[in-house]
Amino acid sequence: MKRFPCRSGPGFLLLSLQAACGPEPAAGRQAPPPPEVRVAEVLVRDVPVQVEALGELRGSSEIEIRARVEGHVQSVDYREGSLVAQGDLLYTIDARPFEARLAAARAGLAEAEAGLARAHQDVARYEPLVARNAVSRQEYETAVALERAAAATVEAARAQVTQAELDLSFTRVTAPEAGLVGRTEVFPGSLVGRGGSTLLTRLSRPDPIHVRFSFPERDYLEFARKKGTGVGDGKDGPPFELLLADGSVHPHAGSLVFVDRAIDTRTGTILLEAAFPNPGTILRPGQYSRVRATVELRPGAVLVPQRAVQEMQGLFHVLVLGAGDSVAQRLVVPGERLGSLWVIASGLAAGETIVVEGLQKVRDGMRVVPVRVEAEAPAAAAR
């Protein structure tokens, strides 16, 4: 058999060096340091249980001012959007046709009264004569009937005078009560009252201001049980708060004044109305706001920052700091929201600490470097 000599050249040495300088095995790597996260102890407080609804403001009375007679508007006698007192003049309608009708009605009344006087004289003259058979009984009875007819004619004429006086008074449109009067719908020269009672303007009484809103049936039951009655009478019961469009809270508490008779079967809600003091007429009808009422106080409730709660497929969980600075995922059941905090109905207990910042860095069972912060203080971003 032919043998070949063993060779050891530069190529063999290069291969040996590459094998010796290869990467280190995975077992030789150093583990990364634990991530730094912000943690806070859960808060424990007495929490009010509240019901809330969207409502629309309206005056405690809402009145449509309409023309009650036909005629041309002579003047608009108020400033639009101003407060008026009861009896203040709002509009003047041309009164000349109504003055003429009143004069004619008074003349008709005078004529009817004269006819009644003549008929009464005839009866007075015939009465002693019929007793002496100087006139027939038929003539006397005819005179008595004519007197009664004349008296009825007088009553009808007086009614016409009263109606004419009333129509004349309607040419001066006055405020039926004190309140805030809106823009005018007619102007001088407009013909009003033809074919119906023309809308002139609207008047609202803004103090107290009312708000109408609808509660879901469940919230209504909670409120009614707390109040002790399902009828709005403005007495007792939890006070209402009014949350305005700019985020502020109306400084005066309100009371319930109206509850509708039935649940709306289409929406499952019931209509309620509450009244709020409105000094200075700051609030106006037509504004939208939120109405809130506290139905009970829940003692010792557990609260956490909303940013500490994660949701996945309808389940909520937090990361709880445990022994050895390791974190564990915990399922929780959230309740009401109070500002930036969330009430936890179950899943956490007083004294436990949770991760509030840096949740994206950690997972269940991981060890962390905790930095303690206040639960309600805005925590700085984790490094």
Image (spheres, helix red, strand yellow):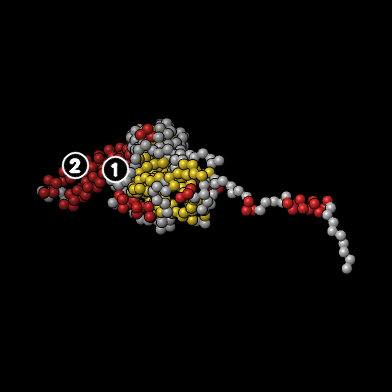
Callout 2 environment at 10 Å: few (<14), some (14 to 19), or many (20+)? some
**Residue identifier under label 2:** 121
Q: Residues within 10 Å of mark 1 (few under 14, many from 20)?
A: some
Residue located beneath label 1 in the image: 159
Locate the C terminus by quadrant: top right
Work out whether mark 2 precedes mark 1 in sequence or the reverse, and give the earlier one.
Answer: 2
* Residue 318 falls left or right of residue 138: right
Q: Amino acid at mark 1?
A: Ala
Q: Nearer the viewer, residue 269 or 240?
A: 240
Place of residue 177 in the rendered image (x, y in percent of width and height, measured from the top left): 33, 37
* Residue at (38, 55) in percent of width and height: 218
Spot the residue most to the bottom.
Answer: 1
| Closer-to-camera residue (38/60) | 38
Residue placed most toward the observer, 283 or 322: 322
Q: Looking at this rendering, what residue extends furthest in the right direction?
A: 2
Horizontal side, residue 119 vs residue 198: left or right: left
Residue 73 in percent (x, y) is at 43, 35
**Contact? badges 2 and 1 (CB < 8 Å):** no
At 44% from the left edge and 36% from the top edge, which residue is drawn?
183
Task: State the SS at label 2.
Answer: helix
| Spatial separation of the CA atoms under disc 2 and disc 1 | 24 Å
- For badge 2, the amino acid type reads Gln
Residue 311 as seen in the image, left or right of residue 114 = right
Q: Position of residue 232 (x, y in %)?
A: 31, 48
Residue 16: tell me if it is visible: yes
Q: Looking at the picture, does residue 79 appear above or below residue 357?
A: above
Give how far across and how far down residue 257 sits, in percent: 32, 46
